[in-house]
Amino acid sequence: MSGGPGPGPLAAMESWPVDHAAAVALGPGGEVTAAVGDLDRPFALASVTKPLFATAVLVAVEEESLGLDDPAGPEGSTVRHLLAHASGLGLDGLELARPGRRRIYSNAGYDVLGATLEAGTGLAPATYLAEAVLGPLGMATTALEGSPAHAATGTAADLARLVAELMAPRLLAPSTVATATAVAFPGLDGLVPGYGKQRPNDWGLGVEIKGTKDPHWTAPGGSPRTYGHFGRSGTFLWVDPDAGRALVVLTDRDFEAWAKPLWPALGTAVLAAPS
């Protein structure tokens, strides 16, 4: 992506309190409209690994190696429950609720998904992700190096390719992306890490959905249908399907109080930028 558009609405990132950052804004159809920083510098993605790995699970579903309603995890839970943090598993694997009763953010649930994917495809999660998603999308510098919940590294250029796929699907069927980015198990309450209890805590399959959450880490004026994910390592991506805009931001400073005003402000600038 060298030689592409300038920073535009991303220029404010030059004053962010981080050592390194890279970002890409995208417009309708997934074209890059602004970029800043070293787009080829690898960053720890932390929980932005989840939507990346969820994409691999969705490919496996389309290939019929898995089914969204296949049993997985605790009794009564399915692949769909695990993708949507509705299996009842807690962050570290304790069974805290019956499936479909609460939205409980769970790294352990994604580890179960990894084992389920391996059982269905015969390939380790990192291998299947590389063959089914990273290779076809040209994400050559992204890799899964451990847990499918949080252990990928990647670049802003690569994550922009993933976002472009979500905006204008070619690898996945558009109907699959539509299912993944709609609310799964509507009405469930739960916690958003760093933002407290949300009623409801809407989530799709691998992505959080903004809904009525306020405050939120995406642009406050964005569509309730905005979906995405952020990571503890100071990373995030989101897509506003109604505005036809998207944003990928990677930093090397952990998510803390510094991010809460800056991330939404940047999102507002991206939504307000001329088409």
Image (spheres, grey):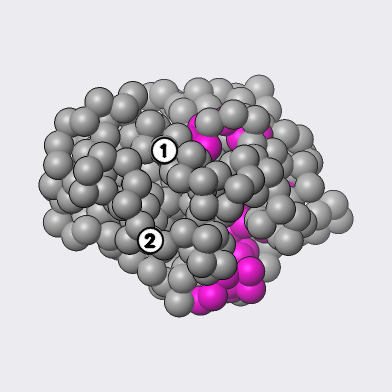
**Above or below — where is 181 with respect to 127?**
below
Secondary structure, mark 2, is loop
Quadrant of the rendering where the N terminus is positioned: bottom right
Q: Does the magenta stretch include residue 109?
A: no
**Above or below — where is 53 with respect to 227?**
above
106 relative to 26 in the view: left or right: left
Residue located at (59% from left, 42% from top): 125
Q: Earlier along the polypeptide chain: callout 1 or callout 2?
A: 2
What residue is disc 2 on?
68
Q: Position of residue 214 (x, y in %)?
A: 23, 47
**Above or below — where is 72 with respect to 45?**
below
Residue located at (33% from left, 24% from top): 92
Q: Are marks 1 and 2 in contact (CB under 8 Å)?
A: no
127 relative to 103 in the view: left or right: right
Residue interval drawn in magenta = 148-174
Q: Is residue 155 magenta?
A: yes
Q: Distance between the residues labelled 1 and 2?
A: 14 Å
Question: How many numbered marks appear?
Answer: 2
Residue located at (65% from left, 30% from top): 145
Q: Specify few, some or many for label 1: CA neighbours under 10 Å numbering under 14, 14-19, or 20 or more.
A: many
**Above or below — where is 5 with respect to 96?**
below
Question: Which of the numbered marks, if any, corresponds to residue 180?
Answer: none
What residue is disc 1 on?
112
Q: Can residue 212 be seen in this view?
A: yes
Secondary structure, mark 1, is helix
